[in-house]
Image (cartoon, rainbow, N blue to C red):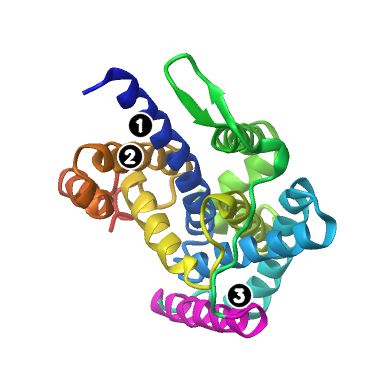
């Protein structure tokens, strides 16, 4: 096997992993803070892709889509949390699961009514078309940009959580929400903000992935499965686990597609099964939160 081909496939795996990180990050944020398994996650990812397409068609700018689509879908996430999720706090875990599962279908059918059932191509921004010579092969420029954007988002998110007062409150609220309420923190408002941020990040992932995938109402089903696998492998609620697992799953899928293409689709599920056999709580999950 040509070493250059393997290196290119590894880099392809990192690019795929970057997309998987974005699919799983919002899922992990919402579960880590609110302990809500959001089964509308894939549908909201899809809504983000369509919102990005809408902005591009109106403004002609992919960069505006990267900014406006996550803000719009994140604001929609605030409404979802306030009107639908909040009344279910304190009730059995099955209730928000069933609600978000149904919400996902409502969003998918709504998009079908507005945009039709056929997939819509999302053109790569003209400035990002082409390939880059990396010395060991040529790699699409857009995928390198996706890796860079995801890395930047992760740095900003880390700084926000680790170096700001808001991040301190979020981390403390995730560990002991009752104590934070005693200290005067409006924990419901905090949950609202975190849910909106999680949904906004999910929508941003949809915009970034759109030029690499056809935008269609069904794209959310695939994304939900990917996000679930990455989150479980990394550990439910662990943001660091979602990052590591996203890269790991991306590389595994990419290398499997090189050596055994027919096994590429199921390789991520095989990886999840192996991880759960060794660590039921996932690579970086806490005991009691494993699946």
Instruction: Give the residues drawn in magenta, as a range.
Output: 93-116
Check if residue 264 falls in the magenta segment: no
Q: Which mark is residue 254?
A: 2
Q: In the shown orientation, is residue 12 left or right of residue 273? A: right
Residue count near mark 2 (Cα–Cα under 10 Å), binned few <14, some 14–19, many ≥20:
many
Quarter occupied by residue 160: top right
In the picture of the structure, the residue carrying the numbered disc 1 is 9
Q: Of label 1 and label 3, which has the lower sequence position?
A: 1
- Name the secondary structure under disc 3: helix
Q: Which mark is residue 289?
A: none
**Residue 238 spot, x, y in % from top left:** 43, 45
Identify which residue is drawn at 49% across, 53% down.
23
Question: Disc 1, disc 3: CB below 8 Å?
Answer: no
Q: Nearer the viewer, mark 2 or mark 3?
A: 2
In the picture of the structure, the residue carrying the numbered disc 3 is 86
Q: Of label 1 and label 2, which has the lower sequence position?
A: 1
Identify which residue is drawn at 66% across, 35% down.
156
- Name the secondary structure under disc 2: helix
Q: In the shown orientation, is residue 136 left or right of residue 199? A: left
Identify which residue is drawn at 65% across, 77% down.
115
Residue count near mark 1 (Cα–Cα under 10 Å), binned few <14, some 14–19, many ≥20:
some
| Secondary structure mostly taken by the magenta-highlighted segment of the chain | helix
**Residue 46 spot, x, y in % from top left:** 56, 65
């Amino acid at each position: 096997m040509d070493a250059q081909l393997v290196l290119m496939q590894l880099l392809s795996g990192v690019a795929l992993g970057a997309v998987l990180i974005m699919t799983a990050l919002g899922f992990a944020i919402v579960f880590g803070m609110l302990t809500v398994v959001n089964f509308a996650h894939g549908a909201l990812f899809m809504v983000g892709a369509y919102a990005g397409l809408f902005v591009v068609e109106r403004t002609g700018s992919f960069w505006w889509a990267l900014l406006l689509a996550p803000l719009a879908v994140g604001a929609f996430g605030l409404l979802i949390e306030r009107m639908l999720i909040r009344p279910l706090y304190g009730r059995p875990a099955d209730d928000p699961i069933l609600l978000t599962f149904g919400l996902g279908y409502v969003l998918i059918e709504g998009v079908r009514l507005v945009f039709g059932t056929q997939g819509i191509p999302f053109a790569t921004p003209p400035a990002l078309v082409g390939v880059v010579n990396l010395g060991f092969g040529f790699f699409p420029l857009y995928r390198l940009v996706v890796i860079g954007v995801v890395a930047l988002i992760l740095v900003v998110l880390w700084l926000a959580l680790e170096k700001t007062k808001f991040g301190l409150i979020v981390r403390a609220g995730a560990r002991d929400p009752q104590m934070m309420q005693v200290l005067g923190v409006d924990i419901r408002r905090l949950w609202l903000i975190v849910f909106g941020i999680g949904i906004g990040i999910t929508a941003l992932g949809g915009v970034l992935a759109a030029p690499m995938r056809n935008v269609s109402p069904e794209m959310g089903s695939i994304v939900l499965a990917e996000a679930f696998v990455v989150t479980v492998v990394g550990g439910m609620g662990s943001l660091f686990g979602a990052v590591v697992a996203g890269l790991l799953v991306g590389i595994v899928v990419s290398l499997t597609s090189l050596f055994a293409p027919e096994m590429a689709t199921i390789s991520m599920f095989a990886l999840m099964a192996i991880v759960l056999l060794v660590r039921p709580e996932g690579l970086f999950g806490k005991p009691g939160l494993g699946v």
